[in-house]
Image (spheres, helix red, strand yellow):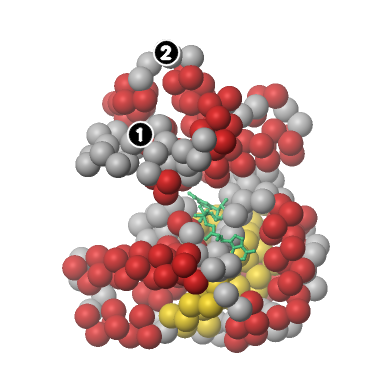
Amino acid sequence: MEIKNVSVIGAGTMGSGIATVSLISGYDVNLIDISMEFLEKAKSNIEKNLQKSVSKGVITEEAYSNALNRLQLTTDYSVVKDSQLVIEAIVENLDIKKKLFTQLSEHAVEDAIIASNTSALKITDIANLYKNPENVIGMHFFNPPVIMKLVELIKTELTSEKVFDLSKEFILTLKKEPVEVKESPGFVVNRILVPMINEAAMIYEEGVASAEDIDKAMKLGANHPIGPLALADMIGIDVCLAIMETLQRDFNSDKYTPAKILNQMVEEGNLGKKSGKGFYDYSRPKVNA
Ligand code: NAI
């Protein structure tokens, strides 16, 4: 099977980025969300990212218009019938993802690869709702997908070798680096990274240091390119909270108890960059973190 057409479901931070990299690499892309308003917003992000690729000389002006012509925006799941690969990047909520996988069983063709971009949820729980669980794999991109080189490929006990190999080939065509990971909560990166972000949030909550100083400390003291709180804002506070909740539930360990402030920020709608406010205020011109 040759992958030519990719359906990306969920047109938020990750879905729009995954759609962009797939377009740059020559795939036809169906981008699917629950409302045209979200899709139009995603389209303008995709246009901006493609324009940046033109300015950096990654693609030509002609390739830019060509890429946009290969993009279809829709709220209709039935378009996945044309795809050899379906990448799910909807909200990090197990029940909503389970519902989607049940619906996908109706629309996807028999040998289509069904990939989930979940940050930490158990892929098997979702795969079991799909008609061919051996076709389901975790394909975990990093934020922002246009820039970040890594993709974790998560094999469940049911994922077939063929699906793994085709997924790996696909990732390489995007000029990204895959790593193979056995199914386990948080996979590799988020199991290490998000508890660190959570600890930084607790330090902030306790008033030990300001957000700016926590980030400065980790940048200059641990040589991190970005501070943990600025990174939390970039990932999304709701996503960080969901990952901690998954780690806490799946390992059944208090070690992963989410910082109270993460719950509070989500309740207040302060989700980070995407909502305009998180640990930093993005309505101000520049965040120095
Ligand atoms: P987001 O909140 O920016 O976007 C989610 C999108 O999914 C929204 O546009 C929403 O309307 C749409 N959606 C919700 N239910 C839907 C449904 N049933 N059908 C179609 N569309 C639906 O979320 P984000 O950050 O893009 O995350 C998406 C997934 O990627 C999550 O599983 C998250 O854990 C994962 N992820 C997030 C990363 C991050 O840094 N934000 C990094 C890597 C993975």
**Residue drawn 42% across and 70% down?**
40
Q: Can you tell which of label 2 and label 1 is closer to the viewer? A: 1
Q: Where is residue 51 in the image (x, y as percent from the top left)?
A: 25, 70
Q: Position of residue 58 (x, y in %)?
A: 25, 71
Q: Position of residue 49 (x, y in %)?
A: 31, 65
Say which mark, if any, is on residue 280: 1
| Label 1 crowd (10 A; few <14 / some 14-19 / many >=20) | many
Quadrant of residue 155 within the rendered picture: bottom right
82 up-or-down from 99: above or below:
below
Q: Where is residue 70 in the image (x, y as percent from the top left)?
A: 42, 84
Is 217 on the left or on the right of 73, as rendered?
left
| Label 2 crowd (10 A; few <14 / some 14-19 / many >=20) | few
Q: Nearer the viewer, residue 135 or 172?
A: 135
**Residue drawn 60% across and 86% down?**
82
253 up-or-down from 139: above or below:
above
**Residue drawn 54% across and 37% down?**
266
Is 58 on the left or on the right of 149, as rendered?
left
Say which mark, if any, is on residue 208: 2
**Residue drawn 24% across and 85% down?**
62
